Image (cartoon, grey):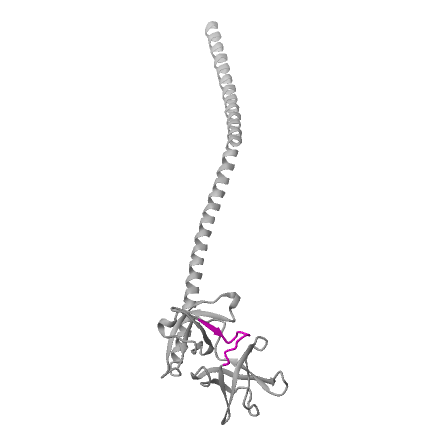
Amino acid sequence: MNKFKKSKFLILIFVLVLTTSGLLMTTYSTWLVTNTANLVSMVDGLVAKPFNFIAARKADLTDLLHTYKENELLKKSLYSLEEKSNQADSLKDENKQLRQLLEMKDIAANRTSLAADVIARTPASWRNELTVNAGSDKQVNANMLVVANGGLVGSVEQVASHSSRVNLLTNKENTDNISVSIKTGSKVVYGIITGYSEEKSAFIISQLNSADQIKNGDKVTTSGLGAYTAADIPVGEVSAMSEGDDHLTKKIYVKPSADLSDIRVVMLVGT
């Protein structure tokens, strides 16, 4: 009986020791696992930071590259649209000038006339001259007047085989002496285009045979007298009057009918 009690007591102690050891081992294992996991997580975070930074920068660079490429495509598209818009505007302007030349066809009826394109007009001589692609091969001669944008713009000055140089009326040194007529009421006054005023943006007409009845708004056309025999080509309208340089005669200023700033096509008119 005593041996049985001792054995039972020993077994109980063994179970208690085993249980306690198990509990202790379980707690230590949990602590060990937890702290190990925390350490691994911390190390993983430290190691991952540089890679995460590089990945973020890579994403930023990729976005920047995509943005740059997109901007380049947009610029090209915008340039293409602007180019097409400019071409369309240029064609509209040229068509407008061509329509104005067609309207001038009636004035050029029964006269020698031909259309030509402007092929040269340099900034240095913009107000003085231009070159067209018609010459002696098309019977151009130095007694022809040049019409564009609804009115007289100049006269043929020099003729080559395939081109001609045009002297513009805005040339301050114009000595072509084109004869004009001013219709004022029931009377017609004659004069000569002798220059151009940049200040007034007007032709200067002097050598008037009379100036008493001339008033602002009177229409001015070519007279057909002198070397240039093409008559009734619109020149402009009277915008002002003043005394001549000799204080004895008068001169008038005529606002041009034509826009001389942008000339692309012209009509050459002769006898």
Report which quarter residue 115 is drawn in. bottom left
Residue 247 image offset from top left, x and y in percent = 64, 86
Instruction: Please tell me whether residue 28 is drawn above or below residue 167 in the rendered image.
Output: above
- Residue 238 percent location from the top left of the image: 54, 84
Chief secondary structure of the magenta span? loop
Q: Is residue 92 visible?
A: no
Residue 13 drawn above or below residue 29: above
x, y (%) of residue 80? 42, 58
Q: Is residue 136 visible?
A: yes
- Hey, which residue is sitting farthest right in the picture? 247
Report which quarter residue 76 is drawn in: bottom left
In front of the other: 139 or 166:
139
Residue 60 is a magenta residue: no
Q: Residue at x 52, y 28 (%)?
A: 43
Residues shaded magenta = 165-177
Which percent across, then down, holds residue 241? 59, 85
Front residue of 241 and 161: 161
Q: At 39% across and 76% down in the image, what residue appears? A: 99
Residue 183 higher or lower than 80, as above or below: below
Number of numbered markers: 0
**Is residue 166 shown in magenta?**
yes
Left/right of residue 238 with respect to residue 102 in the rendered view: right
Q: Please identify the quadrant where the C terminus is shown.
A: bottom left
- Say whether residue 53 is left or right of residue 163: right
Q: Quadrant of residue 212?
A: bottom right
